[in-house]
Amino acid sequence: MRLGYVTTLAAAMGLLALFAVACSSEDPTATPVPTVAPTQTPVPTNTAVPEAAAVLPSSGLEEPEQEWTTRTESEELRLILATPDLAPGTRRFAMVLTDGSGIVAFPVVQVSSYRYPDGSDAVSGREGPVEMALARYFEFPYGTRGIHVTELTFDEAGMWGVEASVPQPDGSVATIEVLMEVHEETMSVDLGEVPPLAASRTLADVEDVSDLTTGSQRDESLYQVSLGDAIQNGKPTVVVFASPAFCTNAVCGPQVEVLSNLSATYGDAADFVHVDLFTNPKEIQGDLTRAMKTPLLEEWGLVSQEWTFVMDRDGVVVGRFENFVPQLELEPSLESVLAAAEVKEPGESMMEAGEVKEFDVSISTTWHDLFDQFEDSEQSCIRDGFSEEELETILARQVLSEEESVGWQETFIDCVDPATARAVWLGNMLASMEGLSEGGEDCIRELVAGADVKAVIAGEQPDASPEEVAVTGVFYGGLFTCGLLGMVEQMGDLEGDEACLADVLTTVDPATIYAGSREDASPRDAAKFETFMLSMFQCVPGLLEFAFDEAAGAPMPTQ
C-alpha cells in the first residue's frame, strides 16, 4: 500500500468528492440531477416509436392490453416502459427515453415514484414522491440503443406513476411521467419462486441447432441442458427466452448474444440455456403467421418479447429481467450466486490479528519522526539499504506528501516488524482523515489490527495477480466501509438510511469494487464500481454534498 495521502482513506473519500463535483445540488435532501447536455444516440429506423402505444412487442405473442400511458409538457420527450409486469416489492424499473434527436443517453437521470390512491390519474391526487432514485444508462451492444435502469419499491398494488427528470442543454429539466398498474402479483415467475420444471428442447432432440433458434448466431453451448434439468441439478442457471430474428422494438436487444458471452466467460460454473419463443424456427421464415409458440411461455407466464432469469443452486429465482438486460447489469446477479457458496468473512484471506501500536502522525510529521520510534534492529536494517545521504533525504520528507508507492518505502516495510508497519499505516490513515468520527476511527483501528501490509501493497502493483488484487480489495472494502461509517455518524440521524447502506456494503464484492477503482480497471469492473457508488448515493442523497464539502475543506499536505 502506498503510505502517502492519496492512497489512504482520504483517497477513498475523494472518490465520493468526484461524484459530488459532478452531481452536487443546493438541496441536500434530494438526489441531484447533473445539468450538462445529454448525449444523444439516433434512434434506428426499426425502433423509432414516437407514441407509447406503438412500442409494444410485435412478436406474435398474445400480449395483454397496454396498461401504461405517459404525460409530459415537452413536445419531444418520450418514455417507453420496458418493465410493465410489476407487483408490490422492490422491482427493476427500466425505460427507454427519446426526444427529437434520438435516444437520450444521459448517464444518470433522476426518477420519482408517486401513488395514485383513488385510481385517478389526476396530478392533484397523487401522493409523493414516495421514493427518489437514480436511473443509470446502459448502452446496448453496438451502441445503437440504450436503456435507463434503477430499482424502485412499490409498497402496494394499484395505480402508480414514475416521473423521469431529464436535463436539457439550456440547463432546464424536462419531466415525463409514466402511469401504470402495479398488480397484486406478477404475471411471470417471480423472485423467490422455483419456476416450472418443464423441459426445453436440446441438441439431442433435433437434427440441427437451427431447429432451436431463429437467430443467425447459433451457440451450441446454450442448448446442451434442458431447462427443467438445469433448475434441478444443483448449479446456478441463466435462461433467456427470446427470438433473435424478431427483436424489432426499442426495449428488445441481442439478449442471446449476451447469454453466449456469459457462457464463454463462466463455462461449467453455471448452466446457460436459451429457449426460443417459437418451436418451428425453420418454418417461420419471416412470416409470424406460421409461428408456433413455445409451451414454456405459458407455463412461466411470459408475454413480453424477451425475458432473462437467474436461478441459484436450489433453483430459486434471484434475478428477473423483463425485456433486454445489458451484460453489465445482468452479470452481478450471476456473480452473486456463484460467490454464495464461497462467502468469507471480510479480510479472511489476509487478516491475522496482531499487535496494534500507534504513531502520532500530523501534516508536519516527517519520516525522521517515525524512524526515531523504530526498534534498533529495524533502524539498522533500513540503514543497510541506503547510503547515509540517501537516507537523510528520505527521512526529511513529510509522511503525508507521498503520492506514489516508491521503492524506498518497500525497503522500510521489509525491514520493520509487522506491528510497526501497521502503526505507520494507521497513523497515516487517521492523519489523512482528520475529523473522522470516533466510530470511524475505531473501525479503522480494528481493520488495521489484522492487516498484512505487504500483501496489500503487492495487490496495488500494476502486475498484481487476481489473487493479490483480491486481498487488497478486501482491505480497501473494509477501509471504505469505515470511512462511510465515519461520514454517516457526522451527518447525524439518517432515519433508516443506515440499513440501506449496510445492505449495499454487504452485497458487493470488495475485491471487484477495488479492481473497478484502479486506473487499469476493465470496462466491466469500472461499471460495477460506478453502480456501487450510485447505490450508496441513492441510500443517502445528502452524502454527495457532504463528501464534497468535506473534501473541499480537507487540508492538503505540502510537498
Image: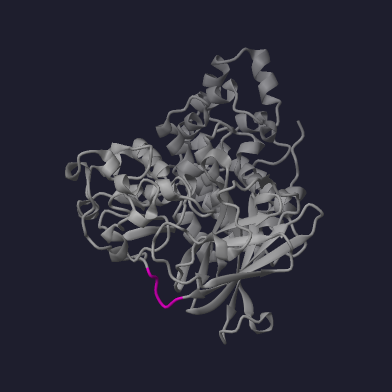
What residue is shown at x 26% (from left), y 60% (from top)? 295
Horizontal and vertical percent for residue 438? 60, 58
State whether residue 206 is above or below residue 191. above
The N terminus, quarter of image: top right
**Left or right placement of residue 249 versus residue 223 in this view:** right
The C terminus, quarter of image: top right
Q: Where does the magenta region start and end?
A: 183-187
Does the magenta run of residues contain 1?
Answer: no
Q: How many marks?
A: 0
Q: Nearer the viewer, residue 465 or 105?
A: 105
Q: Is residue 516 visible?
A: no
- In the rendered image, the residue lying farthest to the right is 170
What residue is shown at x 70% (from left), y 65% (from top)? 175
Q: Is residue 371 visible?
A: yes
**Left or right placement of residue 362 versus residue 221 in this view:** right
Horizontal and vertical percent for residue 533? 58, 51
